[in-house]
């Protein structure tokens, strides 16, 4: 078994696709509309679905906003240069909501950004994570 994807419901698919592809550097892997169900699925990721876990962005045509549940946590991305990645995200209009620094009660360097729907994306500096292990 392996993890295939995580699904997020989004209010504006084009806005979300722009964030995940242009700001976070993922690729649109596939997109399909389901007119009879009035929804569109778009899969984004850093590699092909056959080898990588991806995000499924689900847009229900009649819903432009969702309330985030309090049980949802975040998506995590490993990065080599967290300061540089945060600067690049900011330069592309992304919102850094927790500046890079050591995690509370630990030494792993993390930061958080927020997607257009308010979902949190954690950035984990790989070199500090490996050093802490």
Image: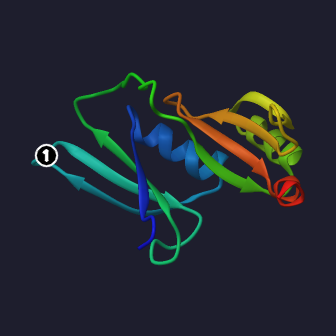
Which residue is depicted at the point 77% across and 55% down?
79
Counting every numbered tag in the picture gives: 1
Q: Quadrant of the C terminus?
A: bottom right
Residue 56 drawn at (x, y percent): 40, 53
Q: What's the residue at 23%, 44% (across, down)?
A: 39
Residue on which disc 1 sits: 37
In this rendering, is residue 106 above or below 127?
A: above
Percent x, y of residue 125: 81, 51
Q: Can residue 94 be seen here?
A: no
Q: For the point 67% across and 35% down, which residue is it?
A: 113
Identify which residue is drawn at 65% across, 55% down. Answer: 25
Looking at the image, residue 76 lies above or below residue 66: below
Lateral position of residue 86 relative to residue 44, left or right: right
Image quarter hosting the N terminus: bottom left
Foreground of the two, 51 or 43 = 51
Q: Quadrant of residue 107?
A: top right
In the picture provided, is 10 more to the left or to the right than 37?
right
Residue 112 placed where, x, y %? 70, 35
Query: Colour scheme of this structure image?
Result: rainbow
Instruction: Find numbered disc 1 in the image and state the secondary structure of the residue it sits on.
Output: loop
């Amino acid at each position: 078994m392996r993890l295939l994807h995580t699904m997020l419901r989004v209010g504006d698919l084009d806005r979300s696709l722009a964030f995940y592809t242009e700001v976070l550097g993922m690729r649109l892997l596939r997109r399909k509309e389901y007119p009879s169900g009035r929804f569109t699925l778009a899969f984004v990721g850093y590699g092909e679905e056959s080898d990588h876990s991806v995000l499924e962005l689900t847009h229900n045509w009649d819903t432009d906003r969702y309330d985030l549940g309090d049980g949802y946590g975040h998506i995590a991305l490993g990065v080599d240069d967290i300061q540089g990645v945060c600067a690049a995200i900011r330069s592309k209009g992304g919102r850094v909501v927790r500046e890079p620094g050591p995690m509370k009660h630990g030494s792993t360097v993390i930061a958080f950004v927020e997607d257009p729907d308010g979902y949190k994306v954690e950035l984990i500096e790989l070199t500090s994570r490996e050093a802490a292990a």
